[in-house]
Amino acid sequence: MADFQTSTHRAKWIFSPQQLVEKYRAANQRAKQILEKCGATLMEVDVDGSLSYPEPQMTAKDSAEKHSRTKPLTIEEEQCIKVFYENKLQEVCNNFRFPHKIQATALIYFKRFYLQWSVMEHQPKHIMLTCIYAACKIEENHVSAEELGKGISQDHQMILNNEMIVYQSLEFDLIVYAPYRSVEGFINDMEEFFNAGDNQLEMLKTLQETARFEVDKMMLTDAPLLFPPGQLALAALRNSNAFHRVIDFDSYLRGIFSRENSMHTMSELSESLDAIDSWVIVSHSNVCPLTEQMCNSKSTFCIGWEPWVTSVLHGPLCGLDFVCRLENTKVLLRRN
Amino acid sequence: MEMEKTGAGVAVLSAKEAFEKLEKVGEGTYGKVYRAREKATGKIVALKKTRLHEDQEGVPPTTLREVSILRMLSRDPHVVRLMDVKQGQNKEGKTVLYLVFEYMDTDLKKFIRSFRQTGQSIPPQTIKSLMYQLCKGIAFCHGHGILHRDLKPHNLLMDRKTMMLKIADLGLARAFTVPIKKYTHEILTLWYRAPEVLLGATHYSMAVDIWSVGCIFAELVTKQALFAGDSELQQLLHIFRLLGTPNEEVWPGVSKLKDWHEYPQWNPKSLSTAVPGLDELGLDLLSQMLEYEPSKRISAKKAMEHAYFNDLDKGHL
């Protein structure tokens, strides 16, 4: 099987919470500085992937005027916008009936892209579509840019223009590992481990279905940037099993440890799975009103970094306490 | 020169600014390959040019696959090293992508041809060394879950001085997963194509690469392609003439493959008739690489442990 252990995914794209905070801060800070200097932040992307920031303001008067109109987003607000577009990404993939793998790959690309950039610099709507397009190519389920654009009434040239900057920002590390495949692998293993009969096979299928929904939830948080896919899959299966009570999960985990020469202990793995659970719970209990408001609005795909966004965002917004959560959550990060 | 970070705020030189093209050395599916000099260091590199927007579809999937796979595999000494990805513009102002590779001065196809033209045999120890390096490189790819799918002498780069061999051109490669998906039928140059692919199998695995390795092994010895068919049917018949027409006994499930028909019945011949000059151990290894049943075909890792390689000095390989 394609090997996570030796992959660029494991080596370069699993972070500690502190590293994530730093990356989000750096991107947000850079965008703020550009806003300060230029009065706007949205970058022009040429078809060859070359970038240009807005021209600096000509006069102090222009600058003052612009600044009175536009306030920068906070990290928490950026997070809200990203979550909104991650939901949209799932929606688009479902509408196109793309396989789960494409949705997962596109989501991971989207998350990685916004580790390098702020949503103030690149339109998340455009990046979301470009990530789906790229995922289709890499997963050998090719769909034309035109078809993708048409499907949601967008100019496909925008997808092609952003393609290179997306690949560059991902450092061309395009082979990614999502938990869905691991869920499938664990289910197959459970069938053998418990020597499942027909009745139990049916129940394991149900377990798998519920676990996939659990993974869907995880994919809308930062968990894929913090934990290896195998652990995310196990956490999803454990939650699913807590609901369906199909197997003795602890005995299965003990079975894994007795078969594998693992450097880690069973209690360490349990701590990791607990950390994933609490991470996902906290993330989902902090969905910001803005996201709900946008999800309920009829005008899909309307938000971009435009001046009116600021006024929406600076309304009565209960922040995600995102940075505090990242810095305070004690996450046991196993890299294997 | 390492693959440079193109994260926010980093100034990136275009290919034109960074390299001086010296000569065209080849032509690929999507563009030309140049020998070039990196201006900053004077280092000689190979630039593989990829035209974008062929069908208004941006970066070709083969290029993407090659780059992403090489990002994982380029640490191995027997896989060609991708050093960077640059972009530039051609004379018509169209965007092009340049993959920057370490430069290798020849490939196995040219190497074999040079011996054929002079009428000399490739020394047995040279064949052994090249085969070991090939098995080692393929074992590395397979160990990382990558099928090459297009192994042929032209895609095996060499350094004439050191006799180092490196696997290149991973445009058709892909990461494989379990269960193995249905894969495209129209891959691989015909001469090196495994019988299960020719017969329309849509589920296949590492064994397709091993078949290709076996064909290359025989070609190193005889300096001629082992099975040189000019159509899928002719290719199958070439194989059947030497190895015998397969049946359910030697290859369970063969008659259920999509493109199976009733074929002329041939009995298997001894491999030594087709590959004279290969010693007994070599013939044994070759026969295991050319097993009909994919699951019985030797793995690259096992091939490296074969007695044929026992007298090879592996220290520097």
Image: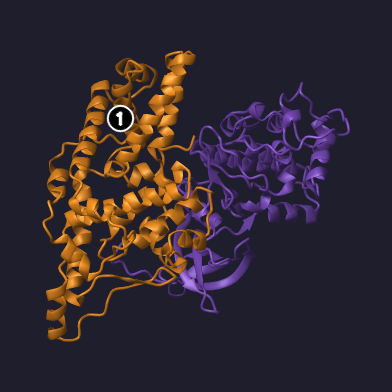
Chain colours: A orange, B purple
Residue B26 in which image quadrant: bottom right
Quarter of the image where one finds residue B135:
top right
Which amino acid is tagged 1?
Ala
Q: Is residue A180 above or below residue A271?
A: below
Comparing A145 with A231, the one in front is A145
Classify A142 as above or below A199. Answer: below
What residue do we see at 63% from left, 52% from top? B155
Picture layout, residue A266 above or below residue B47: above
Hey, which quadrant is residue B241 in on the image?
A: top right
The percent position of residue B256, horizontal first and vertical second, equals: 73, 29
Instruction: Say left or right for A55 vs A328.
Output: right
> In which quadrant will I find the C terminus of chain A?
top left
Residue A319 x, y percent position in the rendering:
13, 51
Q: Residue at x 36, y 48 (%)?
A: A108
Q: Residue B167, image x and y in percent?
A: 57, 48
Residue B123 in view in this figure: no
